[in-house]
Amino acid sequence: MSMHAPLAPSARAGFLAGYLESLLLVERLHRLLLDVIKDEFERLGILDINAVQALLLFNIGDHEVTAGELKSRGYYQGSNVSYNLKKLVEMGYMHHQRCEIDRRSVRVRLTEKGRHVRAAVADLFARQAEGLERQGVLDTDGVDRVNHSLKRIERYWSDQIRYIY
């Protein structure tokens, strides 16, 4: 890890303004992603599931996980994971089964209906990736740079939570 010289006050203010804009963009992009998924599902006539639940199904994919693993693996960022899992099971998108070893823990996996939703989201994302590249919005190098920067911020924030607070 390299140490940088302190920024001059004007540069520090500029960096802070840029950082705050990045935070707003990340938040806005997440909301827009949910809107894009919602619009796609309306177009497909999938109306009984919301965008957060669809993303959850997409991220679980072929894995069998517990509710706790959903958050620890980064598959789910919301606070109401139990509610969404319960709804997805009730609507037939997921199977659930108590763990043999720890009876308090429940493992979940997608049903055929859940895999259909996951495929719809995967198709949407593939079309978007193709469009971003075709229209010159992002190329492979650009995606790599964005991901690298976001992972560094994620690591920094995780360290702040773990070691400072």
Image: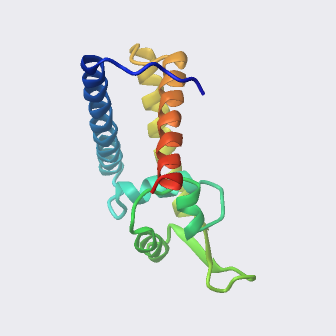
Residue projecting furthest to the top: 136
Q: Which residue: 53% across, 53% down?
A: 163
Q: Quadrant of the N terminus?
A: top right
Quadrant for residue 16, please give it: top left
Q: Nearer the viewer, residue 126 or 148?
A: 148
Compared to residue 31, the image places residue 10 above or below, namely above
Quadrant for residue 138, please give it: top left
x, y percentage for residue 92? 49, 72
Q: Which residue: 53% across, 41% down?
A: 155
x, y percentage for residue 108? 60, 70
Res 110 seen here: no
Q: Quadrant of the C terminus?
A: bottom left
Compared to residue 118, the image places residue 78 above or below, namely below
Quadrant for residue 28, please give it: top left
Residue projecting furthest to the bottom: 103
Q: Nearer the viewer, residue 93 or 142?
A: 142
Q: Which residue: 42% across, 73% down?
A: 87
Side (left or right) of 151 relative to 22: right
x, y percentage for residue 114? 52, 61
Q: Nearer the viewer, residue 10 or 24?
A: 10
x, y percentage for residue 142? 48, 18
Compared to residue 76, the image places residue 152 above or below, namely above
